[in-house]
Image (tube, grey):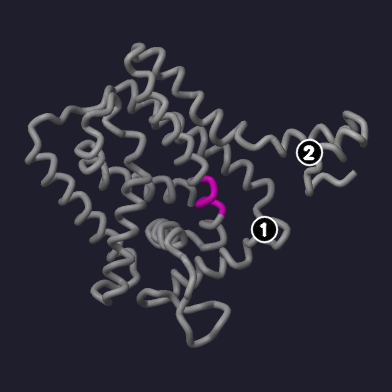
Amino acid sequence: MILRWYLALQLFGLAALPLTLWLFRHLPGRGYSFARPLGLLVGGWLFWLLLTFGWLPNTAGAILVVLVLLAAVGLYLVFRSSDLSLPPRRHVLAVELLFIVAFAAWCAVRAHMPRIETAGGEKWMEIAFLNAVLRSPRFPPHDPWLSGFAISYYYFGYVMMGMLVRLSAVPSTIGFNLGIASLFALTCTGAYGLVYALLAREGEGKAAWGGLLGPLLVVLTGNLEGLLEVLHARGLFPASFWRWLDIRSINV
């Protein structure tokens, strides 16, 4: 199931690759690291729009139609442009390796705590919205909390994840956790590509290694609460320090 999910993500990235190369043709990496998120964003918008007008059914075949449309638009723009070039091969390999490592790592994290429960925040509502997106024949989806009404809340993120669930044919309960791992990996590669572009003038080697600062700072050290909870659980620092720090989830 994980492999099917990964391949579905790759389809979104490949469908959006021509558009990505055209949009980011002046960046050193040609925006390659943004292909998958752009595919989900633009492909999800097209899917939502066509289902809202009732022009497509909520099926895997309809998703493939949307991806073909996305690829066709991108290829049209590419063939009309005369200043396009492919991203460096090493950059492509680095982005793919980073995505696989980040995706696998967060799959392992979610495998140790896969439960969808209220202790994790609004997960009950999130899985309900995801299932509503999957079960509704058209958009807006049915409101899972108010029978007979449509969702009157923002739900586009669930549309994007629902497309992956539908295309990979995995249960929504498993797709929920795979979606979390995907968002982690997509953020890592996006941050890497951004820093890579900023450092490209310093040379490809420095840009490649320096690009790792992007995911490190954005997704790993951006929130230190987990580290502080580990320190508190081990009894480090006096109670006065933790009271002064005043983090709600750390009880003294």
Q: Which residue is mark 2?
A: 229
Residue drawn at x 8%, y 32% is 82
Residue drawn at x 31%, y 34% is 32
Please give left or right for residue 146 compared with residue 134 in the image. right
Residue drawn at x 55%, y 83% is 146
Amino acid of disc 1: Gly
Q: Which residues are magenta?
A: 177-181
- Mark identifier at residue 151: none
Dominant secondary structure (helix, strand or loop) of the stretch shown in magenta: helix
- In this rendering, is residue 191 above or below 145? above
Secondary structure beneath dot 2 equals: helix
Secondary structure beneath dot 1 equals: loop
Residue drawn at x 34%, y 15% is 204
Please give left or right for residue 148 compared with residue 63 in the image. right
- In this rendering, is residue 130 above or below 221? below
Disc with the residue nearer the chain's start (1 vs 2): 1
Please give left or right for residue 247 compared with residue 173 in the image. right
Taking the magenta stretch, the answer to whether it contains residue 178 is: yes
- Mark identifier at residue 121: 1
Asked if the residue at tag 2 contacts the one at tag 1, i.e. Cβ–Cβ closer than 8 Å, the answer is no
Please give left or right for residue 243 compared with residue 76 in the image. right
Nearer-the-camera pick, 237 or 140: 237
Nearer-the-camera pick, 218 or 234: 218
Task: Measuring from the top left, give residue 203's x and y in whole percent.
Answer: 34, 12
Task: Measuring from the top left, give residue 138's x and y in whole percent.
Answer: 35, 76
- Report how many numbered discs are placed on residues in the image: 2
Task: Measuring from the top left, give residue 97's x and y in whole percent.
Answer: 43, 29
Structural crowding at the residue carrying mark 1, measured as other residues with C-alpha within 10 Å and reported as few (<14), some (14–19) or many (≥20): few
- In this rendering, is residue 112 above or below 163? above
